[in-house]
Image: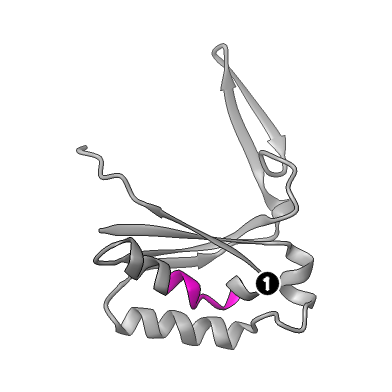
Amino acid sequence: MKYLCLVYSNEQLLHDSPDSPRDEECFAYAEVVRQSGRMLAAEALQPVETATTVRMRGGKLSITDGPFAETKEQLAGFYLVEARDLNEALQIAGKIPAARVGSVEVRPVRQLDV
């Protein structure tokens, strides 16, 4: 089953905390997951100030700068993994280096028949 591991963190803490992972550590962990055969995709995102939010309301398109909601933590990146079950996905997510300074939301991917 596919699981999406959404990595959230306060952008300042992600880079400034003593527990912050460095790029090399993140790359190394991604390589471990890739070599296990469970990695489907992973990407880091640009800073939140580069985000644009799109809404369609009453047939009208609204485009605004920034993320959808004001939060203390922003979406920093993701891992899309293949896991036997939720427990295995949680084990993978718990070892994502950024989990030390943020959080990782794990959600099963809903299969669409398209």
Residue nearest the observer in this picture, 17 or 24: 17
Say which element carries label 1: loop
The coloring applied to the image is: one colour
Seen in the picture, residue 59 relative to 100 is either above or below; the reply is above
| x and y, in percent, of residue 98 in the image | 60, 73
Seen in the picture, residue 3 relative to 65 is either above or below; the reply is below
Residue nearest the observer in this picture, 107 or 27: 107
Q: Sort mark 1 into few (<14), some (14-19) or many (20+) by Cα contacts within 10 Å.
A: some
From the image, give the main secondary structure of the stretch colored magenta. Answer: helix
Seen in the picture, residue 95 relative to 76 is either above or below; the reply is below
Q: Quadrant of the C terminus?
A: top left
The single residue placed furthest to the left in the displayed view is 113
Residue 24, by quadrant, is bottom right
Determine the residue positioned at 57% across, 78% down. 97
Is 57 left or right of 74, judged from the image as shown?
Answer: left
Which amino acid lies under the numbered mark 1 shown in the image of this protein? Answer: Val
The residue stretch that appears in magenta: 92-98
